[in-house]
Image: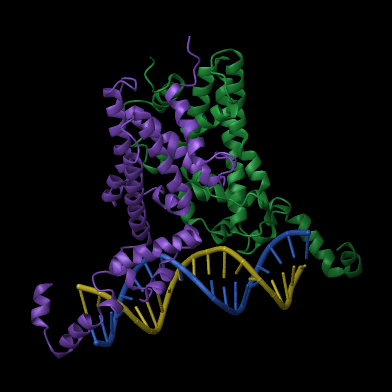
Chain colours: A green, B purple, C blue, D yellow
Amino acid sequence: MRTYYIDNANMTLNIYTVNMIKSKDKYHHGNLRNTLIEIATELLAEDGAHSLSLRKIAQKAGVSHNAPYMHFTDKEAVLAAIAEAGFRLLSVEVETAINQVKKDTEKQLIAASCAYVNFALAHPHHLQVMFRHYDAEKYPNLIQISQASLDQLLKIVEAGQKNGSLIAGNPHEITKTIWALVHGVAALSIAYESKMMLSDKNSTEEVVNTFVQLLLNGLSKGV
Amino acid sequence: MRTYYIDNANMTLNIYTVNMIKSKDKYHHGNLRNTLIEIATELLAEDGAHSLSLRKIAQKAGVSHNAPYMHFTDKEAVLAAIAEAGFRLLSVEVETAINQVKKDTEKQLIAASCAYVNFALAHPHHLQVMFRHYDAEKYPNLIQISQASLDQLLKIVEAGQKNGSLIAGNPHEITKTIWALVHGVAALSIAYESKMMLSDKNSTEEVVNTFVQLLLNGLSKGV
DNA sequence: ACCTGAACACCGTTCAAGT
DNA sequence: ACCTGAACACCGTTCAAGT
């Protein structure tokens, strides 16, 4: 590659090099990848996953319909990158929500759950792309980053077990139970336009609080 | 419509009518709709939702790529029909599972939950199509039928409240909590190839049992 | 290295036409 | 009524070519 430059260094190449510097913005040098992800995320939020096309993304970025292939092997890779960005955003929102309440296990669990459901309601198409099925071998980063929210819950659970507010037992199983409940609420809320899980008279916070409280206190009648 | 037949009854139409009767199978008269749904479900299971096309379905059914439009307004309508069939199948499997155990609330809840998760694992692409977002006004039947599993859970919950095994309180909220947990387990199992929620050493039944038990007994430490 | 234009085999959908 | 063939505007992806 380097030899190529030296061997072919000529007038034409010099002009090209100048153009590279001059038109940094126009040609997105070194930045096109991020630009494409940003634009794709916008289009996703506006029109949904089914009408998201590489060609539209490229057009809106001002590049040819082929430029994305310089940064992504195929459309699936773009979706994976969008999903990855989504998990990062979700993680930040959950973390912020947790930090805004006192160091109380119950309050933290509810705050994290609300943040998760609110993210889903605010970015339904994004959540859909985040929880598509991806080849774990192809996108190891994605799988890893997607566990961030799970780890955030795990921390709360382990702290709760230490301070005596949660039952003993495998903390991973407990964490997964909470996650499944919260993810289920989020997914079903999206599928049914909030009509099924949420209600008009109660806020999302109140409804999520009800679900989490039922999980904390249990559905079985104490003897 | 009827007038049209009478007014235009001629030789040509008679030949066509004969063809209609002769080639009932070939032209799927009155049955093409169901054939298309069946084939679509097969293709969905094999290749996933993203590569399901109306043209492929039509081709496999032996009709022109345009014939489906006689029975469905667009691709979305086909997906809705596939989803509807899926909910009917899920409902049958859940009902069967419930009937195979004693009239014990806990056992019934676990049986129903297992049936739900097993359906998801057996038909991951189908579940994906079932829980896409559909316009409730366009497909009222779909929304209605999709509530069948919820109603099945509700029955168990109400019986459990009556026989004293479940806590008092709004049965709908309790039912939704169970559904959200089970749906969350199903959805996350699919997204992560069962690696996240399920385990290699334990059966699906054992894992689902753990989750449901945690919900029944609660995560909070009793005082 | 990075980007483009032409080309390929596919889509969903519409419409005039056939039986 | 039910189905077909041609046509349209889109896709994702590949490849030779440009700077």
Nearer to me, A32 or A122: A122
Q: Is residue D17 left or right of residue A9?
A: left
* Residue A142 x/y as whole percent: 64, 44
Q: Is residue A123 visible?
A: no
Against B138, residue A150 (above or below) is above
Residue B71 point in image, percent of width and height: 28, 66
Q: Position of residue B59 (x, y in %)?
A: 41, 74
Nearest the viewer among A4 and A20 is A4
Task: Say whether residue A1 is visible.
Answer: yes
Q: Quadrant of residue B56?
A: bottom left
Q: Position of residue D9 (x, y in %)?
A: 45, 69
Q: Tell me the residue at 34%/28% (across/down).
A: B173
Q: Quadrant of the N terminus of chain B?
A: bottom left
Q: Residue at x 55, y 40 (%)?
A: B198
Please give left or right for residue A115 compared with residue A58 in the image.
left
Q: Camera-side residue: B168 or B17?
A: B168
Position of A142 with respect to A212 (left or right) is right
Q: Is residue B25 left or right of residue A133?
A: left
Residue C7 in the image: above or below residue B223: below
